[in-house]
Image (cartoon, grey):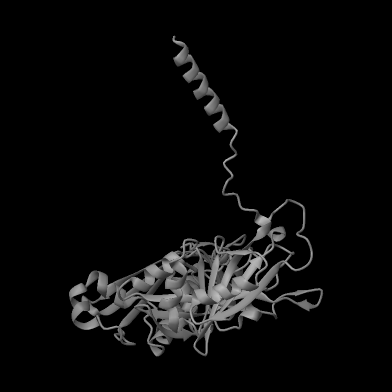
Amino acid sequence: MSTRLIGRAIRLVLAAAAMLTLSGCWDEVDLQEVGYVTALGIDYVDGKYELYGEMIGFNTVAKTEGVQPAEGANTWTGRAEGKTLLVAFQQLMRSTQYQLSLDHLKSLVINERAIGMLDEVLDGLNRQRASRYTVWVFGTKEPFDKLFGADTIFNRSPLVSVLYSPKLIFEQDSSYLPLNMQMFIQQLDEPSYTTILPNISTNNVAWKQQQKSLNLYQLNGVYTFKNRHFNSYIEDTAINGLRWIQPKFSHSIVGFQVGDGRVSISVDKVKWKIKDGGGNPRRFRVELALRIHTIEIEGNHTSKEIEAATNQFVKNEVKKTFLAGLEKKADLLQLRLHLYRYHNAYWKKYASDDNWLPGADDVTIEVRSVLKNSGKYDLRD
């Protein structure tokens, strides 16, 4: 091998060795210099956007087994305003003592006053490089200085809460289906779909710590949308039937009267579908099938009696929710969507207008429940 080739080979080896010594951290960011906003609250007052940002201390995010988070403030809330959403965010950055980042944004809460500006809000957020379609979306009626910074139980991280982890509650009680940004926008853009956005608030009467009331998150009530336009707000007490028609139902516990006693059941599976009523597209038959387990029984009852009482209870809840939606001009059972998908010609002729609603008597509800388990004790034959 010639001296020239040997020299070239040596230079290549030295260059490769030098490259291995590079750390690759030329774009390194010092976490101590960055403030990560984990939740955004958006309000609209007097022609201006009011923007609220919540940041969580890293000491409450890290999970070390057997070690409690450090005491003291673990959330910080900032406020700014501007004619546009990003101008308000710029104002918030000016008062922050760190570089402000949305790279770890996990939740977006829109006050009902800003819901009318929904297109502007979504456009302003989702144009940003840092935006994530995994962000949880909620509506609210509460002022953000009360909503943000809620308490936690066991001094756990604020990330273990309804605001940041709503699926934990849904798996236990499937009354409210949490929506992330992807599902929210997908439903808003789906023709004839009634989008149902959960309302988040705080409850300061349920839990205490050494006689001190705790301010904790809960979901109650929903906002409905048609074709990207806000439609109505419906109170929690009127929509108990929504849980039985959730697309990803997980679990629910209910109690009702059976004869002279009370019975409580656990429901762990629900299937439901919409069918045409008597071959007429204008008539609908909603069929539900439930798998139930008894967890409390007063008196002696047969499985058939409990199943029949369950069927009537669920039917009444779904019917009440359906009628409550009609009062608010909302199609909570997604009947118009059924026409759009399966009877498109009829939909084009009669139901393509966003103001279309089914009649109160156009729906028949049929429920069939199967009792799988009665606990340690057998039921009466």
Direction from residue 262 to residue 58 in the image, left or right: right
- Residue placed furthest toward the front: 4
- Residue placed furthest toward the right: 210
Up-down relation of residue 167 to residue 280 (above or below): above
- Where is residue 261, by image quadrant? bottom right
Q: Picture coordinates of residue 211 (x, y %)?
A: 81, 77
- Residue placed furthest toward the top: 1
Q: Nearer the viewer, residue 323 or 152?
A: 152
Q: Nearer the viewer, residue 93 or 304?
A: 93
**Number of numbered discs visible in the structure rendering:** 0
In which quadrant of the rendered image does the N terminus lie? top left
- Where is residue 172, by image quadrant? bottom right
Q: Picture coordinates of residue 73 (x, y %)?
A: 75, 68
Q: Nearer the viewer, residue 348 or 31?
A: 31
Up-down relation of residue 26 to residue 181 (above or below): above
Q: Nearer the viewer, residue 174 or 97?
A: 97
- Residue occupying image coordinates x 56% and y 81%: 81
Q: Picture coordinates of residue 183 (x, y %)?
A: 42, 66
Q: Picture coordinates of residue 83 (x, y %)?
A: 50, 82
Direction from residue 16 to residue 202 in the image, left or right: right
Up-down relation of residue 368 to residue 238 (above or below): above
- Residue occupying image coordinates x 55% and y 73%: 89
